[in-house]
Amino acid sequence: MTTLVVCLDRTDDVGRKTGLRSPVVGWEAVRALVTDVGLADPEDSSVNSLLETLRVAQDLRDENEAVVVAVVSGDRESMVSADRAVAHQLDELVAEYDPDSAVVVIDSAEDERLVPIVESRMQVDSVDRVVVRQARDIESTYYLLKQFLADEELRQTVLVPIGLTLLVFPILATVVGPAEGAAAITTVIGIFLLYKGFNIDELVTGLAHQARESLYSGQVSVVTYVVAAGLTFVGLFAGALGVSGLDDPSGVVIPAMQFAFDSVPWLAMAALTASAGRLLDEVISDEPIRSSYLNLPFIVVAVGLVVRGFSAYFLEQQGVIEPFAVPAAEFGALSNERFAVTAGERLALFVVTAIVISLIGARIASYFSESESAALVDADADVDSDSSSDASPQSELTDGGPTGSPVDGSDGSRENEADE
């Protein structure tokens, strides 16, 4: 039974201060890493986490368990890239050592978010949270305050809003009154707290980065997103015109149904345009097309039909729109007279059509997914057959244990006996 004792570092503090790339594997390698991190920043809690990792590994080895010691770090660019880096390194460790279970060592709530990634790849027997004890006296409080003031990010997050509040409130109290000034200040503070609480700054940064990458890579979806935005504005304008044209716009239900009835076709076309651009990007790229992108256009059409059908039903019941009439027509020997479709029949027709379209989309997406899965299986079989003829390369990862093999010793003894 092999146990992986892994120290998680989501923000890559170890790599940033030592310049080493993770994963760092092996008893001697991790022990040397403790010295490097301690010399780079003696106040960093990562030193305690590394020491705790070695202590846990030593206790398990004393119990005659096979132990692999490793340090896995994330990325500093974004939280998504950090999590993906940790997942990739864990996959390497699992492929190399095939551990039966893991003991995770962390020192912060940020690192604790990586525990589900480890649990998705192996059984986690224990999560060891390292808490550094601090002296609770005036000197320690002063030191912590000094460290807080030295952190630029904390100063901008805490001190700047407090300073602006103390500066703006007297001006607002003089101009509009104390009550209005206090209300304005609390509103701004509430918006700022929501902005930071929902990580809107990271979302905006991610969207800007994604838009820049899309522009530089020449993706088709950039153009289709612009067209979809234009169609969305047209749909909203059409819905507003429909509501303004009502004879009696009192109430909420009828204006809302009229807005949906007039705007849904344009909004559905906007969603179809955006999804078509994203689908074209998937087709152009070398990666397999995900079934969600194939199914999305059909879902958009189905939802648009359902919303259009229900809004038309309510409007027809209130006499806002006329019943749908099928005109008289002749097709050779076949002919029909003009007849009107009731509101219920019209709604049923829209709903049944939407269900049929969604089923067609699901079937098409499932067909392409099965085809791609079969192609991937064939490709993997070819790769396995090619790799079986080659010798497996030796891994550079080491557990810090002895490099000798008992097989070598046995062979040597046999050779000695033969010589004798």
Image (tube, rainbow, N blue to C red):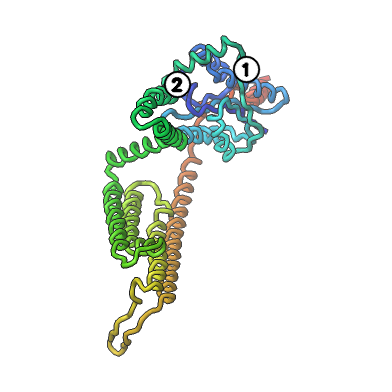
Tell me where residue 161 appears, x and y as whole percent: 41, 26
Q: Amino acid at mark 1?
A: Arg
Q: Label 2, on which residue?
A: 16
Residue found at x 29% / y 61%: 244
Which quadrant would the C terminus be assigned to in this image? top right
Task: Answer above or below: position of 85 versus 378.
Answer: above
Look at the image and tell me whether residue 242 can be seen: yes
Q: Can you tell which of label 2 and label 1 is closer to the viewer?
A: 1
Percent position of residue 321, x then y? 34, 72
Q: How many marks?
A: 2
Where is residue 2, by image quadrant? Answer: top right
Judge left or right: residue 91 versus residue 213: right
Residue positioned 69% across, 24% down in the render: 61
Q: Nearer the viewer, residue 276 or 385?
A: 276
Mark 2 and 1 residues: CB-CB less than 8 Å, in contact? no
Residue at 59%, 18% in the rendered image: 48
Q: Which residue is mark 1?
A: 133
Residue 24: image x %, image y %?
52, 24
Rendering quarter of residue 100:
top right
Q: Residue furthest top?
A: 139
Q: Quadrant of residue 306?
A: bottom left
> Considering only vertical position in the picture, is 390 above or below 331?
above
Considering the numbered disc 1 on the image, is that residue within a helix, a strand or a loop? loop
Query: Is residue 353 rendered to the left or right of residue 133?
Result: left
Tell me what residue is drawn at x 55 percent, y 36 percent.
95
